[in-house]
Image (cartoon, grey):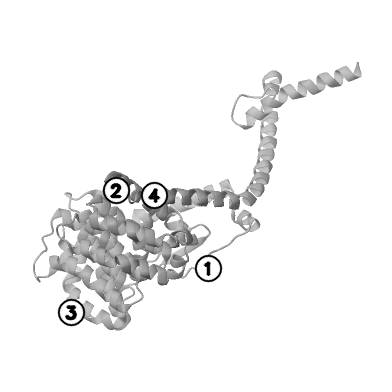
Amino acid sequence: MREKEEAEGEAESLTRAPGTTASRSGGARSSTQADSGSSEDEAASEARSTTSECASQLSAAAEEGLGGEAVEEQGQQEDLEEKVKEYVDCLTDKSAKTRQGALESLRLALAARLLPDFLLERRLTLADALEKCLKKGKGEEQALAAAVLGLLCVQLGPGPKGEEFFRSLQPLLVSVLSDSAASPAARLHCASALGLGCYVAAADIEDLVSCLTCLEGVFSRSCSRRDSSPVVPASLQGLLCAALQAWALLLTICPSTHIGPILDRQLPRLPQLLSSESVNLRMAAGETIALLFELARDLEEDFAYEDTEALCGELRTLATDSNKYRAKADRRRQRSTFRAVLHFVEGGECEEETIRFGLEVLYVDSWARRRVYAAFKDALGSGMHHHLQNNELLRDIFGLGPVLVLDAAALKACKISRFEKHLYNAAAFRARTKARSRVRDKRADVL
């Protein structure tokens, strides 16, 4: 009889186990609770014990998972490399649609992950394929090929092989950019790729000056006359903005001996672009003017611009613009940008921006640094944080030091609980709300 009772007790405990498991996963209530009708205190006690047990299980699973993350990541890398091989093979397909699809997939892959060794082995194949796309392709295909070229320069880095890759395709970028009959979108991406590729891979000062001259020629035609507002067709506004931003990027590495003539030539002309119909072109012009002032003050601490009063008047107008025919989002972006530009031109400091990625922080505290960060952010998109963490080129540019290698114990120590994260987010939300309330207009406050 005793053995029979023990067997029945074991069977009863087995029938209760699924109910307990279901309650942890948010499913049906446990059979024990349904049958006994336990009090709220007992339910709360069971919930606490269940939560504690779940937490310990998750902690143990996390510790085991950290050891397998490296293997899983290696598998993902191998899968990505296989896909990239397929994309590269499709770049020579007869169908233009297939080539464009391969270029877009390749662009997304290069922006998201780091594949320098894999790409170094195939750089000649990629150079030949991109050369054909730029030469024989039309419109969208040329634009995608230029975007991929810029990302390849970021992946290959500034070494001899990266420099060789950029030099082999630089003439084609200049050719498409200078061709007025080419697609505006293709010319736009060629301008961005020329600036980014030259910034990363050009070791010769002659190449730098050549790229600067080419890019300057694109936007200078629209502001060549003094005392006249530039008339820029809507289809070319994006091209002018890209050329101006790429030119400004290269100014950040231009030798000081070349800065003086550039200031004399462009500082009186660029304010004309502040009256452009394109908000992006106006903002690019304002940021470039601030960069020129920064470079000028680096050369001469007491630098004084003769038309500072008139320039500040234009900047102040844009910083307080409330024209209703412009979109509200555009007005806010413009006001924010030109408040910072006006503050700096009048003798203030560049506003510092803090960028957090992983366990690290990047401080952007100058107009040159802002331009460099924006250029890489435009190219890499959502993959910017991954590259900041793992790309030696970007870490060297921004002074972040060697790539951090954290063991399982360090990663576990750096993790914060959900409750701590909630408190941090709540505090950040309150601080952000207070800061924004100081600069919002009355209508925004009401909304």
Q: Which mark is residue 402?
A: 1
The three-letter code of the residue at mark 4 reads Tyr
Which secondary structure, mark 4? Answer: helix
Numbered badge on residue 87: 4
- In the image, what residue type sits under mark 2? Ala
- What is the distance, in whole Å, between disc 4 and disc 2 at their CAs? 47 Å
Q: Element at badge 3?
A: loop
Labels 1, 3: front one: 1
Q: In which quarter of the view is residue 4 placed?
A: top right
Return the disc, 1 or 2, that comes first in the chain's sequence.
Answer: 1
Residue 380 screen position, x and y as percent = 38, 56
Q: Is residue 74 left or right of residue 128?
A: right
Q: Residues within 10 Å of mark 2 (few under 14, many from 20)?
A: few
Separation of disc 1 and disc 4 at Cα?
31 Å
- Quarter the C terminus occupies: top left
Say whether disc 4 or disc 3 marks the residue closer to the N-terminus: 4
Spot occupied by residue 427 in the image (x, y as percentages of width and height): 48, 52
Q: Residues within 10 Å of mark 3 (few under 14, many from 20)?
A: few
Is residue 369 in sight in this rendering?
no
The amino acid type of the residue labelled 1 equals Pro
**Res 362 visible:** yes
Q: Residue, x 30% and y 65% (percent of image)?
A: 169
**Vertical order, 227 against 92 (above or below):** below
Q: CA distance from mark 4 to mark 3?
A: 55 Å
Type of amino acid under label 3: Glu
Comparing marks 4 and 3, which lies closer to the viewer?
4
Tell me if residue 55 comes above or below residue 176 in the rendering. Answer: above
Horizontal side of 69 relative to 346 (left or right) equals: right
Q: Is residue 57 above or below residue 141?
A: above
